[in-house]
Image (cartoon, grey):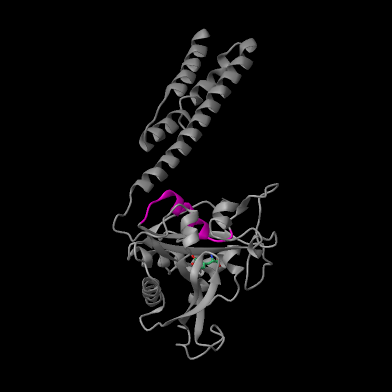
Amino acid sequence: MAEIFETVEKILVDIAAAQPTNAEELEQFRIKYIGTKNIIKPLSKEIRNIPNEQRKDFGQLLNKVKKSAEDKFQSLQSGMEAGAEDAAGDEIDLSAPPSSMPLGSRHPISITMNRIIDIFSRIGFVVEEEREIEDDWHNFTAMNTPEDHPARDMQDTYYLKDSTSMLLRTHTSSVQARVMTSQKPPIRIIAPGRVYRNETISARSHCQFHQVEGLYIDKNVSFADLKQTLFYFAQEMYGVDSKIRLRPSYFPFTEPSAEMDVSCFICDAKGCNVCKYTGWVEILGCGMVDPQVLENCGIDSKEYTGFAFGMGIERQAMMLYDINDIRLLFENDVRFLKQFQSAI
Ligand code: DAH
């Protein structure tokens, strides 16, 4: 009787060891151990020849064999199906058109800023990026803004907690001081970046915005150089027919100072709500670097002169893309941003 037990045990071992590697071999496995003429069936019939006291064990052993055959078949079959799917994936049709990649978009501020950088790069201006957390000296003192100047008022400037001297820069003019104290003339830089002012947020103004600063220092730099540089910028940015107009103004760090308007490119200077029916749009502040600023930063004002300008980005981006609320530029609503997918 021990023999028949051994035969069944051997089948159990065979099942565990079987390794069909393809569909054909799997089918053979199925026929042999599970099919209608499987090799376990005839052994079941032997049960009547088994002595009573061993029948139960024998029955359990047979059940174990059947179950292990079925389980093994199930797992082999699902393994092969998964493998077949992988194999199907390998058959790539190289001639098929690719599925399109989801496209992101540049932010309108970046687009506008990049255009400005590009225009000035073409005439030799180098980009300088500097810190947004500044000290009082670079933001104000070096730039000739005296202690009692209203721009220093807590209302306008964000000071760092518990600090009277560290602040969020209120303009990119602080980069002028950074560059002048660390480089020797000739200096020809533009400094794009974010600035902060404690202002009430509305459709027209925000507590954070962007500027591009320009600074050119060399021997014999004149106001005519400034004018021509800005005229070039206006034509590149707003079209060859653009005109500029300089109005006398005041900034602590320039003397003389001016504000520049560009002829309204939306209405061709005929008058519209963007230019408030004047035909002109204010773009930037500029002037000749005040000799005192050069001296503050260790540059000999008898040897060198320079011009500087600073322009806001938001206003220009809003004009270029017909955006009527500055807050849209800071909310990062994808419905808004998606509209710039085709812009570079
Ligand atoms: N810093 C000024 C502002 O934020 C803008 C400005 C005016 C920058 C004249 C300059 C300049 O470099 O020369 O309003």
Residue 17 appears in the picture as rendered: yes
* Nearer to us in this view, 193 or 285: 285
Q: Position of residue 114 (x, y in %)?
A: 42, 64
Q: Quadrant of residue 332?
A: bottom right
* In the displayed structure image, the side of residue 125 where residue 286 appears, left or right: right
| Residue 105 visible in this rendered orientation of the protein | no
Answer with left or right where residue 53 lies relative to residue 13: right
Q: Nearer the viewer, residue 225 or 312?
A: 225
Main SS of the magenta segment? Answer: helix
Which span of residues is magenta-colored?
A: 170-185
Q: Residue at x 40, y 35 (%)?
A: 27
Q: Quick one: quadrant of the C terminus?
A: bottom left
Residue at 47%, 15% (x, y): give it.
7
Which of 11/311 is in front? 311
Q: Is residue 107 magenta?
A: no
- Which residue lies at the image location 57% right of the left edge and 86% below the top edge? 276
Corner quadrant of residue 223: bottom left
- Where in the figure is residue 199, as x and y percent of width and height? 67, 65
Give residue 333's quadrant in the image: bottom right
Whether the magenta-drawn stretch holds residue 184 is answered as yes
Given residues 289 and 107, the one toward you in this image is 289
* Residue 28 in picture, x, y percent from top left: 39, 32
Instruction: Please provide percent x and percent y for residue 141.
Output: 57, 56
